[in-house]
Image (tube, rainbow, N blue to C red):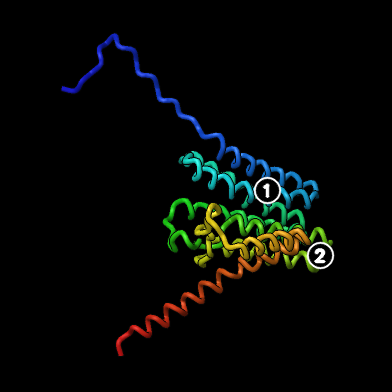
């Protein structure tokens, strides 16, 4: 017979459930920056909106790392992070580039912006529900923060250099359609998760990092647009290279 408490025993107190402050604080900062980017873009303050999106990217890189380092990873944190990412890397870049250039295309412009936002949502849902096909070393499809950085840096460069419509609109079409399509693709992208920030690096690598930071600050919009464009193109190149490698290995191992 199962042990049952006496009838006059006090009812057990429900377990108190809470959330960890530190990692979710960074997630909230990222969500706030993404929301502010939407407001600033609607006012035509494209420089401030672009900085806000990049602030969201920085906060997104810190919240998960802080949670892992402090042992405070929770299901709540993971869900909250995904919702924040949808605002910062899906809705904010889509509205930002729509307000900057895509609105010149009328209905086609906002449909293209919606396509990007929907692709970001699908990319996040796939990442949360499906196993990592390529392991921890690679992402399946362009990560949503990188896609947001690609779109945002295009707007930032176009705004700073005052691109005319015949330049800005095709650029907006390219990065919006391309970024959305690459997010939902099966292309392989290097994840950089094997890089340990706590590990030691050679002195020459430290010099290269310092030089890289200096180069970025010489002209942030142009340098960031170049970097994230190169990363977006790296996916198709890496995938095709590995497919050729596997085909050669399969031909070499096939019996005569």
Q: Quadrant of residue 180?
A: bottom right
Left or right relative to 140: residue 11: left
- Depth check, front residue: 186 or 225: 225
Res. 95 in view: yes
Q: Residue furthest top?
A: 8
Q: Residues within 10 Å of mark 2 (few under 14, many from 20)?
A: some
Q: Residue furthest front?
A: 203
Residue 119 in picture, x, y percent from top left:
57, 57
Q: Secondary structure at mark 1?
A: helix
**Looking at the image, which residue is at 80% across and 50% down?**
44
Res. 122 in view: no
Q: Is residue 70 above or below residue 8?
A: below
Q: Which mark is residue 165?
A: 2
Of the two numbered discs 2 and 1 in the rendering, the one whose residue sits closer to the viewer: 1
Q: CA distance from mark 2 to mark 1?
A: 27 Å
Mark 1 highlights which residue? 55
């Amino acid at each position: 017979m199962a042990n049952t408490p006496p009838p006059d025993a006090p009812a057990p107190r429900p377990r108190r459930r809470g959330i960890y402050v530190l990692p979710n604080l960074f997630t909230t900062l990222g969500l706030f920056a993404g929301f502010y980017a939407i407001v600033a873009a609607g006012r035509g303050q494209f420089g401030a909106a672009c900085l806000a999106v990049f602030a969201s990217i920085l906060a997104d890189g810190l919240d998960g790392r802080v949670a892992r380092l402090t042992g405070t990873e929770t299901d709540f944190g993971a869900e909250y992070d995904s919702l924040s990412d949808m605002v910062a890397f899906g809705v904010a870049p889509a509205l930002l580039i729509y307000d900057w250039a895509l609105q010149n295309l009328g209905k086609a412009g906002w449909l293209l912006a919606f396509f990007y936002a929907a692709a970001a949502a699908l990319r996040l849902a796939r990442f949360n529900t499906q196993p990592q096909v390529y392991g921890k070393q690679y992402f399946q499809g362009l990560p949503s923060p990188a896609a947001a950085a690609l779109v945002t840096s295009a707007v930032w460069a176009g705004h700073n250099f005052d691109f005319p419509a015949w330049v800005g609109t095709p650029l907006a079409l390219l990065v919006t359609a391309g970024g959305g399509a690459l997010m939902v693709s099966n292309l392989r992208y290097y994840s950089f998760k094997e890089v340990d920030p706590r590990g030691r690096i050679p002195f020459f690598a430290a010099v290269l990092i310092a030089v890289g930071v200096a180069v970025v600050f010489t002209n942030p919009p142009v340098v960031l647009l170049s970097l994230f464009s190169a990363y977006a193109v790296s996916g198709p190149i890496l995938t095709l290279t590995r497919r050729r490698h596997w085909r050669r290995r399969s031909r070499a191992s096939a019996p005569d």
